[in-house]
Amino acid sequence: MVTFMHATRTNIAASRIAITAAALLAASMAPASAASATQAQAPQQAAQTMPELKIYHLEGRRSERLVWLCEELGLPYTLEYKRGDLRGSMAQIRAISPLMPVAPTIQYGDQVVVESGAIIEMLLARHGAGRLQPATHSPDYPYYLQWMHYAEGSFASRVIADYRVEMIRPTTTPSPLVDAEDTVRFAEEFLSRHPYFGGAEFSAADIMMLFPLNFADSTKVIDISQFPNLAAWREKIQDRPAYKRMLAAARPDGLIGALPPLQGRP
């Protein structure tokens, strides 16, 4: 009985080896068309047909991010705003999004969408074809996502809170609850180890991070000269041709309606 069981197991093992060998042989002889078809589908899935895109804009505000993104990617868009007239531009936004009149607001085909970070992620997912973001398996991808969300979730929120508190009640020492310099130091330290906020390459995370930094600097919430890595990064990305094209389209008269800087700051 024992001899029979041993022989049966041996036969089963031999059968499995034969099946495996046959499968490997069939795979090696099969045409590569199936794999090629799968690879050919990837670009089509990554770059969908672009519907009409209208960007409702306020000069010098977050809507610049979307113009810059489209210029980097070569995506067609229409920029809707009244030049030199923030109130007029806001009236256009209210007409299309009365419950949430913010810049940016976009009309994407027949949909109205707000939130610059969400709009950027949607445009990249549908029309970016892998550009301006690291591959999901890349070690840089977690950093990219971190800074995409940090730009508004931590950086802009604290900078704006600091500014409002100081305008209402100027102090000699910052409140520990809204100390924007902590968020800036975190970004400064990251750039001491990486050339961009997306890691090794320029990405949409850099587009997201520029607005709160410029706000903090122009309102004197921070002194950017104290953060050399951020200063060098800003100079580098603002020298990009797409950024300059964005300025020509979205800020032809320079920054209008700028908030007054904090008093007593360098």
Image: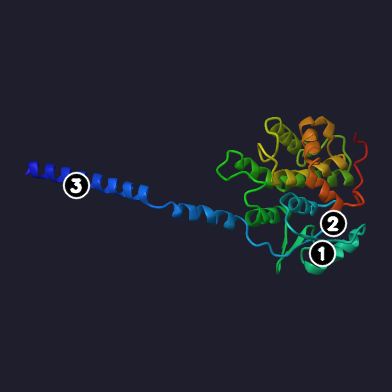
Displayed quadrant of residue 41: bottom right
Secondary element at image label 1: helix
**The one of 125 and 177 positioned closer to us in this rendering:** 125
Q: Which residue bears the numbered disc 2?
A: 58
The circle on residue 93 is 1
Secondary element at image label 2: loop
Q: Are marks 2 and 1 in contact (CB under 8 Å)?
A: yes
Q: Residue at x 9, y 44 (%)?
A: 4
Under mark 1, the amino acid is Ile
Q: Which residue bears the numbered disc 3?
A: 12
Residue 191 at what x, y percent from top left? 71, 33
Under mark 3, the amino acid is Ile
Residue 247 at what x, y percent from top left? 85, 49
Residue 26 at what x, y percent from top left? 33, 50
Q: Nearer the viewer, mark 2 or mark 3?
A: 3
Secondary element at image label 3: helix
The circle on residue 239 is none
Is disc 1 surrounded by few (<14), some (14 to 19) or many (20+) residues within 10 Å? many
**The one of 1 and 123 positioned closer to us in this rendering:** 123
Q: Are marks 3 and 1 in contact (CB under 8 Å)?
A: no
Taking 211 as reference, is 193 above or below it?
Answer: above
Q: Nearer the viewer, mark 3 or mark 1?
A: 3
